[in-house]
């Protein structure tokens, strides 16, 4: 879905997982980018 106004898109995503017709929907904005967790620090040493 494309919104004309940024505020309308933000309001639509207030509930990130609304129930529509009995089914859960996901709402997120592509402009916010991917929300990734910080990668864990690689461990050095023997892997046995």
Image: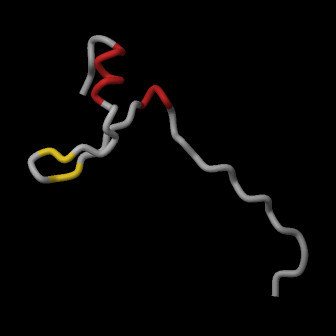
Report the front residue among 25 and 14.
Answer: 14
The image quadrant of residue 14 is top left
- The vertical placement of 36 against 7, above or below, is below
Question: In this figure, which colouring scheme has been used for the structure?
Answer: secondary structure
- Report the front residue among 46 and 10: 10
Q: Look at 34% across and 15% down and name the residue there.
A: 7
Residue 32 in picture, x, y percent from top left: 49, 29
So how many labels did they put on this image? 0
* Extreme-bottom residue of the structure: 48
Q: Residue furthest front?
A: 14
- x and y percentages locating residue 4 in the rendered image: 27, 12
Instruction: Name the residue: 58% across, 46% down.
Output: 36
Q: Quadrant of residue 44?
A: bottom right
Q: Residue furthest right?
A: 45
In the visual, does 20 lie left or right of 39? left
Farthest residue, direction top: 5
Q: Is residue 4 above or below residue 39?
A: above
> In the rendered image, which quarter is residue 48 located in?
bottom right
Observer-nearest of 30 and 21:
21
Residue 6 placement (x, y as % from top left): 36, 15
Q: Is residue 34 above or below residue 37?
A: above
Image-based side of 42 in relation to 38, left or right = right
Residue shown at the point (82%, 81%) measured from the top left: 47
Q: Quadrant of the N terminus?
A: top left
């Amino acid at each position: 879905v494309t919104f004309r106004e940024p505020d309308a898109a933000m309001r639509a995503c207030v509930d990130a997982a609304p129930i529509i017709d009995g089914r859960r929907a996901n709402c997120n904005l592509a402009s916010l980018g991917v929300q990734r967790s910080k990668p864990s620090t690689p461990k050095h040493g023997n892997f046995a």
